[in-house]
Image (cartoon, rainbow, N blue to C red):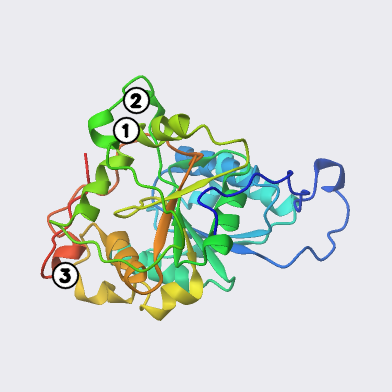
Amino acid sequence: MSAVGTSTPPALPVARWSGDWARPAADGPAVEVDVLVPTVGRPAELATTLAGLAAQTDVALRLVLSDQSAGQDAATAPAVAAMLRVLEAQGRPVTLLAHPERRGLAEHRQHLLDHAAAAAVLYLDDDVWLEPGALRRMLDALHDLGCGFVGSAVQGLSYLADRRPHETAVFERWDGPVVPEVVRRGTPAFDRLSLHNAANPAHVAADLDVEPGGWVPYRVAWVGACVLYDRDALEAVGGFGFWSALPSEHAGEDVVAQWRVMERFGGAGILPSGAVHLESPTTVTDRRVDAPDVFFEDAGARHGA
C-alpha cells in the first residue's frame, strides 16, 4: 500500500445525466455504497447535504434517509423534495424511513445500519456538504487500505484564515499498512483529536500538496460526521447495538463504534477531506453522558472544541 493514494483519471459517471432523466429508467449498476443519513428538523441543511450527494456522480450509491423530525416530514420540505427527485432521476435508489421515537443517536444509527445492504456504508450527518469526487476517493481508499473505516473529517471554512500549528503538529501519515490500534484518553493517539478542529484538515491538506484526485491516509483518534465503513467490519463489532445500554440523551456513539472497529480492523482518515461542515448549531445539546465513558473504563473521551 502506498502512503499516497495514486491520482487516477476521472471515473465515468454512473449517475444518469439530465438528458436521460425523462427516459424510462433501466437497471443501473450495482450499488457500491449505502449512504446513511439521520435527520431531525433541519430541512435547509439536509437539502444542502443531498445536493452534495447528487454531485457524487462517479459512485453507484443508494440513499437511506431516516427522519425523526416532529411535525413536518423532512422529505416534504420543497428543497429536500427537489434533491430527492434529482437523486431518483439520476438512477440513485432512495429509501425513506420515518423513525419518530427518539431513543438516542446510537439507536438511530443502528436503525439505519439495519436497513443497509451494500458492502460499504457511509454515515453522513445532515449538515455536511461533499465536494464532487469526495466519496469516490473515500471508497478507493477503503478498498486500497483494506481497513475497517475511512473518514473524511468535516472542516469549518469560516476558520480558513485561522491556522493552528499547535493543533496540527500531531499529524502522522499511515506509512505502510493500516493496522489495528487502541485509542484511549491518556495515550498519544488520543491527542490526534485536535487535527479535526476548525479548518485544520484544509490546512494540513494544503501543506501535503496532493495532486487532484489523490489522497493521503493518516492516523486518527476518531472521525465525526462523515465516515465510510466496511459494513462487515462494523457489524462484526456489533455496530451501534450498544444503544440499549445508554440513556436516550448521549453523545460520543461514533467514538465507541470507531474505537471497536479500529481495535480489530484499523481505521484511517484521508486528506484532502472534501467534507464541509455547514456550521449550523448542533442538535445534540445534552452531552452529560459521553458514550465512551460508559464502555471504556480507562478512557472517557470528550470531543475537541
3 and 1 marks in contact (CB < 8 Å): no
Counting from the top left corner in percent of width and height, residue 259 is at: 30, 65
Q: Residue at x 46, y 59 (%)?
A: 176
Of 273 and 27, nearer the camera is 273
Amino acid type assigned to the residue bearing label 3 in the image? Phe
Q: Name the residue under label 1.
A: 198
Quarter placement of the C terminus: top left
Of 172 and 253, nearer the camera is 172
Q: Residues within 10 Å of mark 1 (few under 14, many from 20)?
A: many
Amino acid type assigned to the residue bearing label 1 in the image? Ala
Q: Is residue 153 left or right of residue 170?
A: right
Q: Residue at x 60, y 35 (%)?
A: 211
Q: Residues within 10 Å of mark 3 (few under 14, many from 20)?
A: some
Counting from the top left corner in percent of width and height, residue 97 is at: 50, 64
1 and 2 marks in contact (CB < 8 Å): yes
Of 31 and 139, nearer the camera is 139
Q: Mark 3 points at which residue?
A: 296
Q: Mark 2 points at which residue?
A: 159
Amino acid type assigned to the residue bearing label 2 in the image? Tyr
The image shows residue 64, relative to residue 231, as above or below, that is above
Q: Can residue 64 be seen in this view?
A: no
Quarter placement of the N terminus: bottom right
Secondary structure of residue under mark 2: helix
Secondary structure of residue under mark 1: loop
- Report, in whole angstroms, how far the alpha carbon at label 3 lies from the one at label 1: 27 Å
Counting from the top left corner in percent of width and height, residue 241 is at: 33, 76
